[in-house]
Amino acid sequence: MAAASTAVDKIAAAYPRMASYASDIVRVAKNLDIDPAWLANVINFESGGGNPAAFNSISGASGLIQFMPGRGMSAERLGYTTAQIRALSGKDQMPLVEAYFRMTLNDVRKSRLTSQEDVYMAVFYPVAIGNPDYAFPPIVVAQNNGIRTPRDYTSMANARARLPVSGIGSTGVSAFTSVGGMSATTVALLASSAALSATLFWVYREPIRKRVAQLVG
């Protein structure tokens, strides 16, 4: 719990406009199995530091992650108009943020987001999730100051980030928890090794049984 509070404090310090819903950012990040810094950095980039009423007068995109208006677009699919989203507080928008990410992962048939770059792409160009060298179409490049790939986009967005893109504590295999003095990463590696050992034993169980019988027979 103390580590989670530290993550909340770090988000609030880096992005004061997010202070009232920093705990919600950490909660949603945990639910999505991503680092809370990644989510906070995306919200910062998309909404000018965490302004829930952020509005793009050209596209009509609104809110913390710039939900898009129009038939079949993100706001409508979540059951809202962009005007309704802008009227919500940051705290009240966070369930929509989580729902958006889950919907997007399902759309592109991905199980999870594994990097800061992935989280940016989930909002900007979902089909590029997991592919840092994806070539954006010419119209996208023209509309975004020559940004050609997810690497380019991420470099631009990270230049405005106030939290380390390496994270402030992951929420899946995490720095938030430890077991018996071991980091969760170590525990996960040991669990993977144990699973591999169990698999190998199952595959070779009959030769092993026969050899054991010979030795004790």
Image (cartoon, helix red, strand yellow):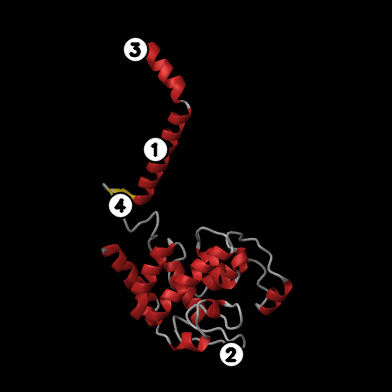
Instruction: Give the distance between the C-alpha atoms of the residues marked 2 and 4, in whole angstroms.
Output: 47 Å
Asked whether disc 2 touches disc 4, contact meaning CB atoms under 8 Å apart, the reply is no
User: What number is the disc on residue 57?
Assistant: 2
Q: Which residue is mark 4?
A: 178
Earlier in the chain: of badge 1 and badge 2, it is 2
Earlier in the chain: of badge 3 and badge 1, it is 1
Q: Which residue is mark 1?
A: 194
Instruction: Give the distance between the C-alpha atoms of the residues marked 2 and 3, in whole angstroms.
Output: 81 Å
Earlier in the chain: of badge 1 and badge 4, it is 4
Asked whether disc 1 touches disc 4, contact meaning CB atoms under 8 Å apart, the reply is no
Choose mark 2 or mark 3, whichever is in front: 3
Amino acid at the residue labelled 3: Val
Q: Circle 4: is it few (<14), some (14-19), or many (20+) Cα within 10 Å?
A: some
Task: Reply above or below: 159 against 129.
Answer: below
Earlier in the chain: of badge 2 and badge 4, it is 2
Instruction: Give the distance between the C-alpha atoms of the residues marked 1 and 4, in whole angstroms.
Output: 18 Å
Task: Reply above or below: 85 against 41.
Answer: below
Q: Which residue is mark 3?
A: 216
Residue 55 on image: x %, y %: 53, 87
Choose mark 3 or mark 1, whichever is in front: 3
Q: Quadrant of the C terminus?
A: top left
Choose mark 1 or mark 4, whichever is in front: 1
Residue 153 in view here = yes
* Residue at left offset 43%, top offset 79%: 93
* Residue at left offset 37%, top offset 56%: 174
Earlier in the chain: of badge 2 and badge 3, it is 2
Amino acid at the residue labelled 2: Ser
Nearest the camera: 84 or 152?
84
Amino acid at the residue labelled 4: Ser
User: What number is the disc on residue 93?
Assistant: none
* Residue at left offset 56%, top offset 83%: 61
Asked whether disc 2 touches disc 3, contact meaning CB atoms under 8 Å apart, the reply is no
